[in-house]
Amino acid sequence: MTPDDLAPEMTAWRRHLHAHPELGFEEHATSDFVAAHLAEFGLAVHRGLGGTGVVGTLRAGPANRAIGFRADMDALGIQEMSGRTHGSRTPGRMHACGHDGHTAALLGAAKLLAATPDFSGTIHFIFQPAEEHGRGATRMMADGLFARFPTDEIYGLHNMPGLPLGRLATRAGPLMAAEDNFEITLSGRGVHAARPHKGVDPIVAGSAIVLALQSIVSRRLDPIASAVVSVTEFLTDGARNVIPTTVCIKGDCRSFRPEVSQAIEAEMHRLAPSIAAGYAATAEVSYTREFVPTINAPDQTAAARAAFGGDTVNAPRQHLKHPEIRTIDHQEPPRPAPVLQSPPLPSVAAVSRHGPAPPRPLPIISRAHAAFVGLNPVSFIPSGPVTSALRSSGYGRRGQRIGQEVEPGIGISRD
């Protein structure tokens, strides 16, 4: 059995999953589908981790080492308008981030390795719910994922159609940034727009805060530190002719190092209340950390580069362009691509890695990578531990939009 042999079946799996998308922690039919196929392949199946998570375990030979392969299963709250025969049958739901392809690819890896288990050790195939929420991985760990299924290393990937066809983008060290969210709530005193001197205008104060936030990266952080502070929402409770009482500013921050994240938060807490006070308003800051960064281990990165072919692997550029949302489908034979490991951060070391790193990757890596991304006619950015869910683009080619007639391939988009 080869990935080429599996291509028609994997295409059918992806189309089925694409037609029946489910949101995070609601992947009941999806987990039924995954569990049934894993059992058919002869794997030991474990359900209920993180609510709808599934783990399939495959053992071969006497070795006691174990690795994990991980894929995400959830869809997004987007209305699909592609008109494809296998398009979403659920209004307001769409596999618009490629998780249908990830799930089908990991099922393909499980079937191929179960049929030809020419390795010695244990593989845990981990199907994670609620990646888009950013809560599925932690829920699985809270349910004992790594206590019940200890692994020496764990691998994942995410497709990235912004790269040339057939290439892998990866590098040792930081690859995907941590994500933090913030919410700044300003309180003033609402008043008629014709009598601003009788009120306290939180819009003016909020506007000043938005501008000041742009100075955190440019003036308060070390220029060597990579960080992004983006204001994404500015909400009020006013009306066309009424100055509001409340303004809510929301946004997103990215960084690679905990101390940078902490510095951004500290600056927000310093800036927002003091600027608001200058306009006779008040401000409260809420700052939450959603995702830890993905940091690739050097040895496993080197192994993946060698398995994929060094001349087709490149370090990702600082800024990769993402295509617009689109949906296409797969007819081409699959191409192999490897998976990578990210080492756990200290805060999750006890659950995301067990024992010292092995000197070499398991022998299965050079075989498993072909099936793990067997649907792939594109290029990928591999991800890290289950704790680092990636939010990136999905399967597809560049240049097509939803509803446009396109040539065959694998579909989908970015969130």
Image: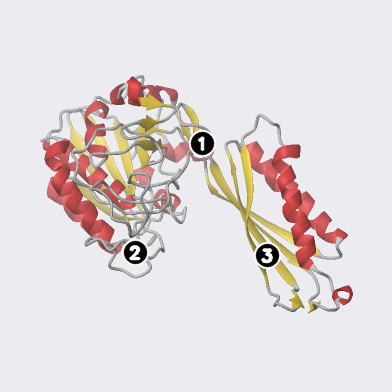
Task: Determine crowd level at label 2: few under 14, some 14-19, many 20+ residues with C-alpha closer than 10 A.
Answer: some
Mark sitting earlier along the chain (2/1) = 2
Q: Position of residue 284 (x, y in %)?
A: 73, 61
Q: Is residue 392 placed above or below 379 in the rendered structure? A: below
Q: Which mark is residue 211?
A: none
* Label pair 2/3, CB-CB below 8 angstroms: no
- Check the image and report above or below for 212 versus 378: below
Task: Pick out the residue farthest to the front.
Answer: 405
Q: What numbered label is drawn on residue 345?
A: 1
- Position above or below: 414 against 223: below
Q: Position of residue 341 (x, y in %)?
A: 39, 32
Question: What residue did someone put label 2 on?
Answer: 81
The coloring applied to the image is: secondary structure
Q: Which element is circle 2 on?
A: loop
Q: Would you identify the image quadrant in which residue 256 lies?
A: top right
Q: Is label 1 in a helix, a strand or a loop? A: loop
Q: What residue would you read off at disc 3? A: 248
- For the residues labelled 1 and 3, the Cα–Cα distance comes to 33 Å
Q: Residues within 10 Å of mark 1 (few under 14, many from 20)?
A: some
